[in-house]
Image (cartoon, rainbow, N blue to C red):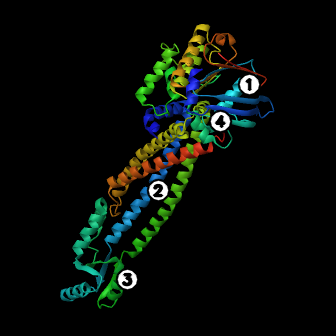
């Protein structure tokens, strides 16, 4: 295997020569690999974002309790104390009408001006409970047994909807990765086969000189890696740009959507695309070499 | 042949041993008949005969490019039989072949072609380049080292192919008509180069129909083949 290390420069030079010979098909395969990986990156980003959103919402699992409007302060205080004693409840606090109004102002952001058209504050005060998500069912059941409670609101419905979207994206993501893998392998293996065909005389000479198959294959493996990594880099640029654009577009009008931080998301995308590119490059070249293998000794 | 005598005394086995070897091509053309041959390390063998007599076919068998139809053939301890592709490939690493059609890689310089023959033989990269340059000097191509092989003449390409065989420091050189395209001076120079390899016990087998070049050889063995049969063997 020492000869592999001694010839790294030679392998790259040979790969460059093979790429130059079929320049146009190589450029086209880089573009198509880049596009395929870009679509995969976008699907995976959506999956990650929705998973993060579900997690964020789960961490913010809460129940809002609306009580009868005629209750006095002492009764409300007692109700808060009773609720706090329930198993699964972390904290219970009163959110006044003004605080509820301010919260909505923050959520609406620039659009908060619509609230000014209202004559009076339309929000009621309520008791806000932070709870252990796993105990949500039992907490709601216990709350229903407390006198004076008009309405109980929780975010289970939103969570369920998000969960189903996430699971759909996850399934779609796996299917897409499989499709991406298959198409990239086909593209790369065809390019490698074409390269082997163009260099068939050189390969035959090397075999007659006794060159190990690894020595003959190495430039083609490198060629496959150059193609997929170049496609991967193209996909990284396109997806990073697109994700940034989507973030800017979403965070303005929909500020309440809990998006994960942008930098780790892009970092994960880069790692994922480069890993996929390397794996597809090696597998695609190996497939090309295997399908073009010479069954004869020479 | 003192060299051969010394080798035999050391008990080294034959480099090539052919026993009643027959060979026919797939179209039925009979190329070789009843070949018996024992070649020892350090031997210098000249195989002569007219075109189509079976010289190239014999070298193809020695290289493991073709297999005997009948008989036993061992080259460098490796039986030349089907189903041993990987071992035959390893055996070829000990051979320095000079093909009749040279088999040089186009688009590469003379020195790159010479180096290509030995890149996978574990020479240190710096040493490999040095050896390739020396080999090209020996065959008189010091001024064409960095020329692309497609810009070289037929005779120059032949000398690049010879340099590629020599740089491998092989145990056996198989040269098919290596002087066919060379003028008399260059041809004698190549024959001398091959003869000098005897010093490191390299066996050289050269096919040629240019009998005038080997008429006056002092060392070596002459084998004459006609119609696929060895019809004459004599010491030089």
Q: Horizontal and vertical percent for residue A210?
A: 57, 34
Check residue B146 in the rendering and tell me which mark sits there, or answer none. Answer: none
Mark 3 or mark 2, earlier in chain: 2
Whether the residues at callouts 4 and 3 have beta carbons within 8 Å, the answer is no
| Residues packed near mark 1 inside 10 Å, few (<14), some (14 to 19) or many (20 plus) | many
Name which residue lies at 55% across and 40% down: A213
Q: How far apart are marks 1 and 3 (CA)?
A: 93 Å
User: Which is in the foreground here, disc 4 or disc 2?
Assistant: 4
Whether the residues at callouts 1 and 4 have beta carbons within 8 Å, the answer is no
Q: Horizontal and vertical percent for residue B85?
A: 63, 41
Element type at marker 3?
helix
Check residue B54 in the rendering and tell me which mark sits there, or answer none. Answer: 1
Front residue of B10/B205: it is: B10
Q: Is residue A277 left or right of residue B223?
A: left
Front residue of B9/A118: it is: B9
| Chain identity of mark 3 | A
Instruction: Establish whether labels 1 and 4 are both on one chain.
Output: yes
Q: In this view, does B7 lie to the left or right of A8?
A: right
Whether the residues at callouts 3 and 2 have beta carbons within 8 Å, the answer is no
Q: How far apart are marks 2 and 1 (CA)?
A: 66 Å
Residue B229 position (above or below residue A176): above
Residue B233, quarter of picture: top right
User: Which is in the foreground here, disc 1 or disc 4?
Assistant: 4
**Residue where numbered disc 4 is placed:** B74
Whether the residues at callouts 2 and 1 have beta carbons within 8 Å, the answer is no
Name which residue lies at 29% across and 63% down: A112
Check residue A43 in the rendering and tell me which mark sits there, or answer none. Answer: 2
Q: In which quarter of the image is the C terminus of chain A?
A: top right
| Chain identity of mark 2 | A
Check residue A137 in the rendering and tell me which mark sits there, or answer none. Answer: 3
């Amino acid at each position: 295997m020492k000869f592999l290390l001694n010839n790294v420069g030679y392998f790259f030079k040979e790969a460059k020569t093979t790429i130059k010979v079929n320049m146009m098909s190589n450029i086209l395969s880089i573009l198509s690999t880049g596009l395929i990986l870009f679509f995969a990156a976008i699907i995976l980003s959506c999956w990650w974002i929705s998973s993060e959103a579900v997690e964020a919402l789960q961490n913010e699992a809460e129940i809002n309790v609306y009580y009868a409007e005629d209750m006095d302060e002492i009764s409300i205080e007692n109700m808060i104390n009773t609720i706090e004693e329930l198993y699964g409840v972390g904290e219970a606090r009163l959110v006044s009408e003004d605080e509820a109004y301010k919260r909505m102002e923050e959520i609406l952001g620039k659009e908060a001006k619509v609230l000014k058209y209202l004559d009076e504050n339309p929000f009621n005060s309520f008791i806000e409970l932070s709870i252990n998500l796993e105990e949500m069912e039992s907490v709601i059941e216990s709350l229903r047994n407390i006198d004076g409670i008009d309405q109980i609101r929780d975010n289970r419905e939103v969570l369920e909807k998000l969960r189903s979207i996430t699971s759909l994206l996850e399934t779609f993501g796996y299917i897409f990765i499989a499709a991406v893998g298959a198409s990239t392998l086909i593209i790369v293996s065809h390019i490698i086969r074409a390269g082997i065909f163009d260099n068939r005389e050189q390969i035959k000479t090397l075999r007659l000189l006794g060159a190990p198959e690894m020595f003959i294959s190495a430039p083609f493996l490198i060629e496959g890696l150059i193609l997929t990594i170049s496609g991967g880099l193209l996909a990284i640029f396109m997806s990073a740009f697109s994700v940034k654009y989507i973030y800017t577009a979403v965070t303005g009008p929909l500020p309440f959507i809990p998006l994960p931080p942008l930098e780790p998301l892009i970092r994960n995308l880069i790692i994922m695309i480069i890993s996929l590119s390397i794996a597809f490059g090696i597998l695609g070249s190996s497939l090309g070499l295997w399908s073009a293998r010479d069954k004869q000794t020479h | 042949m003192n060299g051969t005598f010394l080798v035999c005394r050391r008990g080294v086995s034959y480099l090539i041993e052919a026993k009643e070897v027959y060979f026919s091509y797939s179209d039925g053309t009979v190329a070789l008949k009843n070949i018996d041959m024992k070649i020892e390390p350090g031997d210098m063998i000249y195989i002569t005969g007219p075109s189509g007599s079976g010289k190239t076919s014999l070298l193809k068998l020695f290289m493991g490019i073709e297999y005997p139809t009948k008989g036993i053939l061992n080259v460098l301890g490796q039986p030349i039989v089907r189903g041993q592709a990987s071992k035959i490939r390893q055996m070829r690493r000990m051979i320095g072949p000079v093909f009749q059609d040279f088999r040089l890689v186009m688009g590469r310089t003379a020195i790159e072609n010479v180096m290509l023959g030995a890149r996978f033989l574990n020479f240190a990269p710096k040493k490999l380049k040095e050896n390739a340059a020396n080999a090209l000097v020996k065959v008189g191509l010091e001024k064409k080292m960095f020329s692309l092989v497609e810009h070289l003449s037929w005779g120059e390409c032949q000398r690049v192919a010879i340099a590629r065989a020599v740089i491998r420091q092989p145990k056996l050189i198989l040269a098919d008509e290596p002087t066919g395209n060379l003028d008399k001076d260059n041809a004698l120079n190549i024959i001398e180069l091959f003869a000098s390899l005897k010093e490191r016990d390299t066996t050289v087998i050269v096919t040629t129909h240019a009998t005038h070049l080997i008429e006056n050889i002092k060392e070596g063995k002459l084998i004459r083949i006609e119609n696929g049969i060895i019809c004459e063997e004599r010491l030089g």
